[in-house]
Amino acid sequence: MASEIKRLLRARAAKRATFNRQCLHSKVCLKDTWRRPRGLHSKQRKDYLAKGEHPEAGFGSPKAVRGFHPSGYREVRVFTVAELEGIDAATTAVRIGGSVGGAKRAVIQNKAAELGIKVLNAKEAKVAAVVEEVQSND
């Protein structure tokens, strides 16, 4: 099954298309997020070749790998050390929540390393400083 997942992830990456917003190049204030073209005379709405693709059925990722991280792991958001207990290290990776502080993040990262769980948004510099501080206090 692992080879099948890798094949589907490669297929998903190869199928990535960029859908550009109409007139994005000419207006500074527009953000690079897709918006459906609605103008009566819009060339992009009329599907002229050089005006950019529309997202349509068929651009989605395969159901078996939908929601997977590009590394091939399922993502789980974690806020406490207790949430690491039921996680399968072979198929699941952890993303530490943004509201978790530095000290608690260091504890979560150390526990994840002990359990062999991959942390997707690890912060190395703060971990070393906090671990040294905790060890010096003991």
Image (spheres, rainbow, N blue to C red):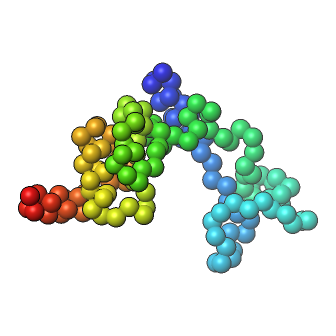
Residue 103 horizontal side relative to residue 85, left or right: left
At x 36%, y 34%, the residue is: 89
The x, y position of residue 26, in whole percent, is 69, 74
Q: State which quadrant residue 117 falls in.
A: top left
At x 40%, y 36%, the residue is: 86
Residue 29 horizontal side relative to residue 134, left or right: right
Residue 25 visible: no
Q: Nearer the viewer, residue 106 or 1?
A: 106
Picture quarter with the C terminus: bottom left
Q: Nearer the viewer, residue 46 or 127?
A: 127
Residue 30 visible: yes
Q: Is residue 74 above or below residue 79?
A: above
The x, y position of residue 62, in whole percent, is 62, 33
Instruction: Give the total of numbered labels.
Output: 0
The x, y position of residue 127, in whole percent, is 23, 58
**Residue reaching furthest to the right:** 40
At x 31%, y 57%, the residue is: 105
Residue 126 horizontal side relative to residue 37, left or right: left
Q: Is residue 2 above or below residue 93?
A: above
Q: Nearer the viewer, residue 69 or 135?
A: 135
Q: Is residue 67 above or below residue 4?
A: below
The x, y position of residue 85, in whole percent, is 36, 39
